[in-house]
Amino acid sequence: FILSSVDSIKMVAIPDQLVWEVVKNNNSFLRKVNGRSKRSGTMSFSVEKGNLRSLSSYKQSGIANSKAVGIAATDSNSAV
């Protein structure tokens, strides 16, 4: 079965919370640091676009949060 065009593929809208439950423990942007926290011993950081604070949480996620905001520099060094 070969698709003749990309336009025939339809994306399904899923809730942000479901996306977070799927990617919160395993994604390519997750960085775990040992020994940085007194209570847990391990802290999780995330380096994806849209995550301005680099924290691995639903509120800060650039993947799972549809209201994510990103900052990028232009050639004239002004923020966009």
Image (spheres, grey):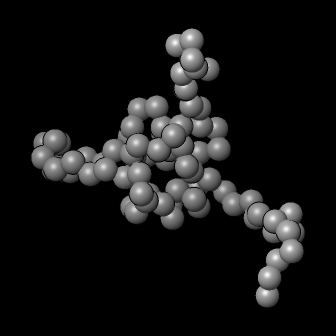
On screen, residue 68 versus residue 5, left or right, reads left
The quarter of the image holding the N terminus is: bottom right
User: Outermost residue, bottom direction?
Assistant: 1
Q: Classify 78 as above or below 57.
A: above
> Across the whole image, how many numbered discs are drawn on residues?
0
Q: Classify 59 as above or below 29.
A: above
Pick whichever, 14 or 52, lies toward us.
52
On screen, residue 5 versus residue 20, left or right, reads right
Determine which quarter of the picture holds residue 76. top right
User: Outermost residue, front direction?
Assistant: 75
Pick whichever, 80 or 77, lies toward us.
77
The residue located at (31%, 50%) in the rendering is 31
Residue 46 is situated, as x and y percent measured from the top left of the image, at 39, 45
Pick whichever, 38 or 6, lies toward us.
6
The residue located at (57%, 17%) in the rendering is 75
Residue 36 is situated, as x and y percent measured from the top left of the image, at 16, 41
Residue 54 is situated, as x and y percent measured from the top left of the image, at 39, 37
The quarter of the image holding the C terminus is: top right
Res 46 seen here: yes
Residue 29 is situated, as x and y percent measured from the top left of the image, at 41, 51
Q: Classify 10 as above or below 31.
A: below
Res 10 seen here: no
Q: Classify 67 as above or below 79.
A: below
Determine which quarter of the picture holds residue 9. bottom right
The residue located at (42%, 57%) in the rendering is 28
